[in-house]
Each structure stands twice: as C-alpha cells, then as structure tokens.
Image (cartoon, helix red, strand yellow):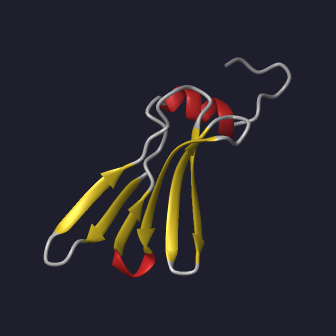
Amino acid sequence: MEVVIDAGGEVRTYDVVATRNGRRVEIETGRGVVTVSEVTRSGTPVRTARFMANRILALVEHPAADQNIAREDIEPHLPGSTG
C-alpha cells in the first residue's frame, strides 16, 4: 500500500507492505485518521502508520508481486482441471 500525503508544501510517499508470506495490509478510517497496518494471519498488527485524512492525496494498492500466487487465490480449481 502506497500512501501519498501533502506535507505542507511538499508531497511525501510512504509504503506499507506485507513483509512475509501470510501477512496482509489493512486500512481503517475513523475520526479524521486513516490507519494502515501490516497484520499477521491471526490479525495481530506488526507495523502501523497513522495519517490525518485531510492530508492524504492518494492511497494506492499494489497487486501481489507473484501473479501466480494471486491467481491461485482468486480462481477456483474445478474438478478435472489442471493448474
């Protein structure tokens, strides 16, 4: 997840990534704050970044780096099919 913010006259970019297999990045919003967290499979936060919502210019979500893994998670496996 890439977060682009207005830092008072300049633009800054922050990257929050899932650093290990099985981890994911979650986004929460509330009370003018956007929280971006890397979490484990069980939902335990590993890293957290908080940004003021009115300073965020863009939230960019990048697809999984390994397209084959992403495809396996999305496409169902049918009986008798290969892959």
The number of numbered badges drawn on the structure is 0
Picture layout, residue 9 above or below residue 50: below
Q: Considering depth in this image, is 82 or 55 the residue closer to the camera?
A: 55
Q: Residue furthest left?
A: 9
Q: Position of residue 59 (x, y in %)?
A: 41, 64
Q: Where does the C terminus fall, quadrant-wise?
A: top right
Q: Is residue 62 left or right of residue 57?
A: right
Relative horizontal placement of residue 50, taking residue 83 as reference (left or right): left
Say if 50 sits above or below 41 in the image: below
- In the rendered image, residue 8, in percent from the top left (x then y), is placed at 19, 78
Query: 74 or 79: which is nearer to us?
Result: 74
Nearer-the-camera pick, 15 or 72? 15
Q: Is residue 33 above or below residue 19?
A: below
Image quadrant where residue 70 sits: top right
Image spot of residue 23 (x, y percent): 59, 35
Residue at image location 65% in from the left, 30% down from the top: 72
Q: For the point 27% across and 58% down, which residue is it?
A: 13
State the image quarter where residue 49 is shown: bottom left
- Residue 78 rendering spot, x and y as whole percentages: 81, 28
**Residue located at (43% from left, 51% from top):** 1
Position above or below: 70 against 81: below
Q: Is residue 3 left or right of residue 37?
A: left
- Residue lying furthest right: 79
